[in-house]
Image: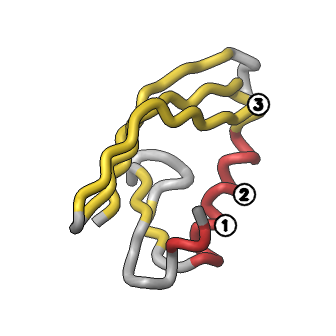
Amino acid sequence: MLGYFGRGDRLEGSGDASWGGTYTNREDVAGFFALLSEYFDDFEVHPTSCWQRPDRVVDIGVIRGRGKLNDEPFEIRYCLIWK
């Protein structure tokens, strides 16, 4: 995934979370995933669907893991839109 950054792509995390912000290059995105490992164990991303158009890619899936503070498992759905 890091190979896609550096062409004007960006990753945006929720501003309400400690890892929130805008990440625009390979080093920033690598730092984003390293930061997630401080908060979560067993962090896994499972894409379930992907659609490609000439101007964008849509990726839908599930993220699973466990919070380090409470050891509670979680599962959330995600949608990434790459323009």
Q: Residue at x 55, y 51 (%)?
A: 18
The crowding category of the residue bearing disc 1, from other C-alpha atoms within 10 Å (few below 14, some 14 to 19, many at least 20), is few
Q: Residue at x 42, y 27 (%)?
A: 77
Disc 3 to disc 1: CB gap under 8 Å: no
Secondary element at tag 1 = helix
Please give the residue where the numbered disc 3 appears in the rendered image: 42
Please give the residue where the numbered disc 2 appears in the rendered image: 34
Measured as percent of width and height from the top left, residue 52 is found at 31, 53
Q: Residue at x 48, y 46 (%)?
A: 17
Please give the residue where the numbered disc 1 appears in the rendered image: 30
The crowding category of the residue bearing disc 3, from other C-alpha atoms within 10 Å (few below 14, some 14 to 19, many at least 20), is few
Give the residue type at disc 2: Ala
Sooner in the amino-acid sequence: mark 3 or mark 2: 2
Q: Residue at x 27, y 61 (%)?
A: 56
Residue 58, numbered circle = none
- Of all residues, the one furthest to the bottom in this rendering is 7
The quarter in which the N terminus is drawn is bottom right
Give the residue type at disc 1: Ala
Secondary element at tag 3 = strand
The crowding category of the residue bearing disc 2, from other C-alpha atoms within 10 Å (few below 14, some 14 to 19, many at least 20), is few
Instruction: Say above or below: 43 vs 70.
Output: below
Q: Nearer the viewer, residue 38 or 5?
A: 5
